[in-house]
Amino acid sequence: MTTPSELDPRTLTALGVDGALEAAAHPRATASVLSGLSAHPDARVRARVARHPNAPLEVLGALAAAYPQDVLDNPGLPLLRLARPGFLNVFPAEGVAALLSLPTVPEWVLDAATRHEDYSVRTALASRPQLSEVRVTALAGDAGWQIREAVARRAELSPLLTRQLAADDDYDVRKAVAARADLPGDVLRTLVQDSHGLVRASIARRLDLPLDCMLTMAADGDTDVLATLARRVDLPRDVREWLSGSDEALVRAAALQAWSVPAAWLFRAETDADPDVRAALARRPDASADVLEKLACDEAESVRRAVLEREDLPEGAILALARAPEQDIRLHVASADPLPASVLDVLLADADPTIRTILAVRPDLGPQRLARLATDVNAEVRRAVAYAAAPGADTLATLAGDANIGVRRAAAAHKNLPHALLQALGEDSDAGVRLAVAGRTDLSPILRGRLQHDEDSSVRAEAELADA
């Protein structure tokens, strides 16, 4: 048996799985051998390295993210803690965060995470459930705002810490407090007057916002706050009406996003000067077919794209989008299923050959439209027709006689190719066409025999293989 000391650390990743597992579990495995095995492709090998007491500190740190429990179960950790009390500070942050994600973590890991230099580790600790009140209180006073924000998002937070964080210097922390379901009423009313618009917008989003606070916020000078408020369905009628006619387009668009709005608002939005408002109208489920057809022709691309998002478009709106100046909108329409015949005819005349190519393989195009595409000026379009499931005998004959060899090669592979066309293509001047014919399994003995004696060696070989 080979002992770990005889192994070359530079070649350990190529070691077989059984040998690597044995080496990773050997009590005399050296630090260099374990370092080499830590990069082994088998996860079981790497897990054994994570549990080995001789594994170097940097190896344990590298493996902690993927194998946190194995690292914690390593019997060498007690000695390592004595020799290097702050060793978790040299672990990568993601490794320590993985340790903190385990259901049960030793107190010494929590202590080390509290003092860790990387803010993401302390943030992970602050997000961990079932922390003691002492630890939570300490983290609420951390110098990093990300840590205090994580504390403010905790499911359980004492009223004392809630009030402390509601007065935090950082608006992200206060915004997290504003989103808490258990926010005390006095703190809520304080945050209504917060200096930062994002905090006030978070308050404006609350389901339990008192009526008097709504009235106060309706006079807010921040557009985002007003837009958030305008989306509410429980506003007093005069406030809703006032916000729907705001000078800010963002607020008017937001007012249209409420579940139920007066019909007059919808009518007014049709002719709104701002495309964001018209786009919001296009997304409403109660927008009429006439309105959608009008918006599908809108001068603003953003409005047309908002119409495109819907799955309940009337035929007139689909027709309008099929004529849109943006190629990707027309491509989206051409790929939709199903499509009215009127839309297919519009796309059939599209100036972009890419659109016509997509049409060629649609199962609902029909033989007449396929016959038209079979004579298209673009060879790519004609070749795509050869991939259609049922182009019809006449269309296949057109493709088989095409001047472009690529089109004829595609036609030669069609499963429904009549015998007469097979015969003709089997004598084609292009070896690639004959090669496509030679690979078929439905050839007559005479045609196959002729191809087996073709002047081109690839054709002969293909005919032999297909006959085997």
Image: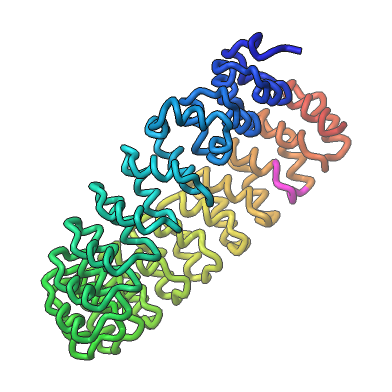
Q: Residue at x 47, y 67 (%)?
A: 343
Q: Is residue 11 magenta?
A: no
In which quarter of the view is residue 15 placed? Answer: top right
Residue 300: x percent and y percent?
A: 26, 64
In the foreground, 132 or 191? 132
Residue 317: x percent and y percent?
A: 40, 73
In the foreground, 231 or 26? 26
- Indicate the colouring scheme: rainbow
Magenta residues (range): 413-418
Q: Residue at x 29, y 89 (%)?
A: 263
Left/right placement of residue 79 relative to residue 29 reads left
In the foreground, 373 or 221? 221
Residue 289: x percent and y percent?
A: 40, 81
Q: Residue at x 56, y 54 (%)?
A: 360
Left/right placement of residue 454 relative to residue 257 reads right
In which quarter of the view is residue 25 placed? Answer: top right
Give the answer, above or below, for where 121 lies relative to 243: above
Give the answer, above or below, for where 308 lies relative to 61: below
Magenta stretch, main secondary structure class = loop
Residue 315: x percent and y percent?
A: 45, 75
Left/right placement of residue 432 relative to residue 246 reads right
Give the answer, above or below, for where 232 lies relative to 238: above
In the foreground, 293 or 349? 293
On-image quarter of the N terminus: top right
Q: Visible in this render: residue 146?
A: yes
Q: Visible in this render: residue 273?
A: no
On-image quarter of the C terminus: top right
Q: Residue at x 25, y 86 (%)?
A: 235
